[in-house]
């Protein structure tokens, strides 16, 4: 209780230590009246809500990004399959036309 705020929060490591001890109530750094406790609880809840909203926005954007990448990959694979099918169909058509041409040639020779 004897240290000043500039000593407690002078650097990052000391500030984190005192902030965590202060938030969890492990050691009474200062005595608070009822109104101050209400303000501290409301501030903690609002802080957590803000942090949670930013986390939700970020994670939603990340999930949307992954879904879009997955969709684009599916579209690319579908295009590859479609082109392969077109190639097979063209080859079948050529083979069938050769068969028809050979039948036509046999009919004309007889």
Image (cartoon, helix red, strand yellow):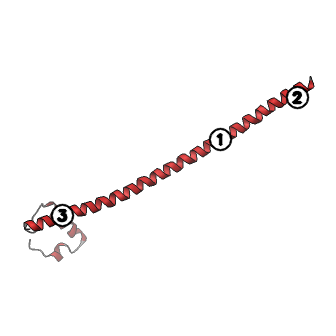
Question: What's the CA distance linking mark 3 and mark 1?
Answer: 63 Å
Residue 96 in the image, given as x and y percentages of width and height: 77, 31
Numbered disc 3: secondary structure:
helix
Residue 12 in the image, given as x and y percentages of width and height: 25, 70
Question: What's the CA distance linking mark 2 and mark 3?
Answer: 93 Å
Q: Is residue 65 left or right of residue 20?
A: right
User: Pointer 2 and pointer 1: residues touching (CB < 8 Å)?
Assistant: no
For disc 1, the neighbor class at 10 Å (few under 14, some 14 to 19, many from 20) is: few
**Residue depicted at x 28% and y 62%:** 50
Residue linked to disc 1: 84
Q: Is residue 60 left or right of residue 46?
A: right
Counting residues from the start of the chain, the first of labels 2 and 3 encountered is 3
Question: What's the CA distance linking mark 2 and mark 1?
Answer: 32 Å
- In front here: 36 or 9? 36
**Residue depicted at x 31% and y 59%:** 53
Counting residues from the start of the chain, the first of labels 2 and 1 encountered is 1
Quarter where residue 3 is shown: bottom left
Tag count: 3
Quarter where residue 103 is shown: top right
């Amino acid at each position: 209780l004897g240290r000043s705020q500039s000593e407690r929060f002078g650097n990052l490591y000391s500030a984190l230590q005192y902030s965590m001890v202060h938030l969890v109530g492990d050691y009474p750094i200062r005595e608070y009246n009822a109104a101050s406790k209400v303000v501290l609880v409301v501030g903690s809840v609002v802080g957590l809500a803000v942090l949670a909203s930013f986390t939700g926005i970020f994670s939603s954007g990340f999930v949307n990004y992954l879904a879009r990448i997955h969709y684009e990959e599916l579209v690319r694979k579908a295009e590859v399959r479609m082109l392969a099918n077109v190639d097979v169909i063209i080859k079948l058509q050529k083979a069938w036309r050769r068969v028809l041409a050979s039948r036509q040639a046999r009919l004309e020779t007889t």
